[in-house]
Every structure is written in C-alpha cells, then in structure tokens.
Image (cartoon, helix red, strand yellow):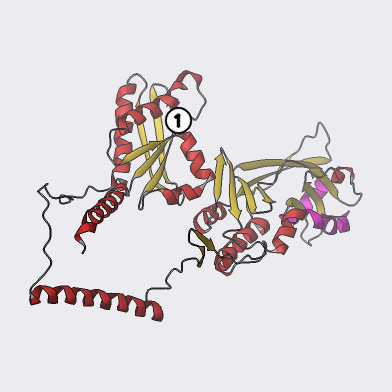
Amino acid sequence: MNLAKRPLYNLCMMVISVNFLAAAPKLYLYLLPFDNINNEQAISWLGGGFADMLTKEMTTIEGLFLRNQDDLENIMNNRALLLKQPRDSRNILALGKYSRKMDQIAVDMQFIDIANWEELDRRQVIGSYNNIPQLNNELAEVVKTVCTPYLPQKKTTKKIYPDFTTPQATAIPKTFGDRGAVITSSIDDALIELERSMDFVIGARGKPKEAPAKVPVAEDEWVVDINNRPFNEPTPENVNNTALLEQVLANLMDKPYDVFLYKPTYVYDEDVDDKMITVNMRVDYGIKGDIINDMLTSLPYTGLKQDGSLMIVHFDRENFNFSPELTKNISLGNYRAVPVIRFLDKDGIVMAIILDTPESRWYNVSSNKIYFIPLHQFSPLVDFTMGGWSLQVALEDVEIKAHYSLQMSIKEVDRISRVSLKFVPEAELGAIIFPHL
C-alpha cells in the first residue's frame, strides 16, 4: 500500500466504524394518554398523568426512545419510515385504559407491535385512588418488565482504536518469504471473488444487483438511461402482492360481515288489538376480525390511519397492479350490499320482508301480498375509494345492534318456520324483492 495514501485509508476506516456503531438497533416506545373508560370527570386528569409519569420513568433507560401521539400518526401515515430505522429496531405501542370502582383504580395496559399490529402482552394493575404514587410505581415496573426483552442487548467489545503511539512507516517487504505472503494473500482474494461470481452464475446467491447504466456525455456530466413504460402497465414483480390483495378484497366485498341473528320474540297486547302480535327481531352486525388482520399482516400497505374505531388503509401502484375490473367495480359501487330479512313458512313461502337500506326510493314501495317493511338501521362498515395512484380502504370496527319489529296476525305468526338474512347487492334488490310483492 502506498504510504502517502495511508492516512486517507485510516480516515475511511474510522468513518465506517462510526457509522456501524450508529446503526445499533433501538426500541421505540409510543406512550399515549390513557383512556378514561367511563368518562368520569373527577379522575380524567389521570389519563395524561399516567403517560407523563411513565415518560419520566422510562427516559433514563438506555436504548429506549419515547414517542408521542404525533410520532405515531406519522408512522401510520407513512409506513416507509420504519425502513429508515436501524436494523432490528422494534416499535411498541402502549395503550392504557382505566376506571374507578369505589376506592380502587383498575388500569389495563396492552402492548402492540406496530410492525405487524400483533399483541405482545397485556397486563392489569389495581391500586388505591388514595395512593396514586404507589400505583404509578407499579405501572412503571410493568412497562419496564414488558420492554426489557426487546431492548438492544449490550455487547462487550474490545477497544476500537489502539492507544495513541508515534506513527511509524510500514516497511515494504523485502525478503522472499514476505513477498510470497503478499502474493499468496492476493491469490486467496482472487479465488474468493471467483467463487462468488460462480455462485451468482448458478443462482446460489441470487441475482447480483445491476447498477443503472450510466453513459458518459461529457467529462463533467453523466446521464442515466430510463426505459419508460406506460403508467397503467402491470409490473411482473407485483403479481404476488396483487393476488393477495385480490383475495382480501374479494372477502371484503362478498362476505365482510359477522352476523348474529337472534330468535324473534313476540309481544301480545289484547287491549290494543286481540288479533295482532308484534314480532321483534334483533340482529348484531360487525366486521370480520380476520379480514382486518389479514390486510395488515399480509399486504404491504403504504399508509395506515386510525381514528377511534375507524381505520383507513392505503395501497399504491408501486406494490400492486390494479385491474380495470377492480377499478370499475369500486367506481360503480358494485360491492355495496344491504341486509334483507325474510320470514318464511314451512313450505318456503315468504310471508314478510324487512329491507334495511338507506335508499329512499324503497320507502314508497308497498305490497298487498306480504308484509314489506323498509327501514334504515344498518350502515356499511366498509368503503373503497380508487384514485389515480392508490386504493383506499376504510373499515369501521364497531358493532351495530339493530332492532326490527312488525305486526302480524296470530295465524300468520303460527306459520313462521324460519327467518333468513342475506346481504344483497343494491343493484340486485329489485330481482330479489319484486317477485314477492
């Protein structure tokens, strides 16, 4: 090695070592104000108090970095920020909620891995309202216990740099043995490089990354050739992601809801009408939990925003190929469906229909054959929006408790054999309902 270039070489090695040390993994803990479950005003101050106390306690822990509500929203809106963190870093969201019963304060804490939205741990602490400091200490110990396994492990390393000594020039090997050692080392390096190249050829190490072709135009100018492709042309590398997306979207469009259908109850009041009975029907609607989990864990989304029970997920064209058919179905709203409840006798003849729809035109429809009741208690919990570059999926994770009622004669009630509920696309309602009216 040229002695004149030796100081520059040492400087480069120093920079590389410093960068390596700076890339140590970190634990990011997102602490939000705790949720006051019963909205009790007298203890509302504890929501921010618990968060402030934990922030103070956890600040001194080495390798742990605290984040707040704004940092969480930034991560949710731009998941690419996770890629900019040091390798093997962890992001944990600490959610707390509390309530009071007599003199006791019950605090429930849930710890979630933001990378895949899985629950890491769940703890509960119960303390006295008259001894909040003790309750704070117990909460701090819980958070430390949960976070400790995810903290970067300390490594005992040797000194990076030797003690300072007067620099001395390295002598050039003069003996035959010294020169032979240098030649042997060079041959070993060449063999390693040859072996690496052969592994790439046979595919043992995958395919080497090809740098963009650079064409020298002038002595001080370089140009990168770009092969443009049409904006909407599918890309082969997105085929697998697109197949997963289509599968999840098919479940969201066709069967997104969990439904619990209760048996009807009957109310008879002979003082009002001794020939009629009021039939009450209760139905609970909700989003299937596995659909949300599949979407968040199996698909590379570019944005995620959560506001209470509302969750909005963004997918863009960099990762997916949006087909014209999918774009058409979303733009026309073909995925929208509403519940149709039918009361049938033992022969399968429809006796009554309850249509739960926001479409006002159905409220003017009546029938002389069956009981036809149009209502509006159900609201869609899934919505899709297709833009020029991305697909937005909005999910509302709530439970709708709908109560339906209609009056039927005693003889008709005796004929009821079963109740059927089916989600029917809005465009197909006429074909399903009109034949019975």
Residue at 33% over, 37% down: 143
Q: Which residues are magenta?
A: 408-437
Q: Is residue 15 above or below residue 129?
A: below
Residue at 60% over, 49% down: 287
**290 horizontally vs 88: left or right:** right
Q: Which corner quadrant holds the N terminus?
A: bottom left
Q: Nearer the viewer, residue 389 or 340?
A: 389
Give x and y (percent) for residue 159.
15, 49
Q: Does residue 419 appear anywhere in the picture?
A: no
Q: Is residue 430 magenta?
A: yes
**55 horizontally vs 229: left or right:** left
Residue 8, by quadrant, is bottom left
Q: Does residue 383 appear anywhere in the picture?
A: yes
Give x and y (percent) for residue 45.
45, 21
Q: Nearer the viewer, residue 247 or 402?
A: 247
Q: Is residue 369 magenta?
A: no
Give x and y (percent) for residue 194.
31, 78
According to the picture, the residue beneath numbered tag 1 turns out to be 33
Q: Amino acid at mark 1?
A: Pro
**321 horizontally vs 204: left or right:** right
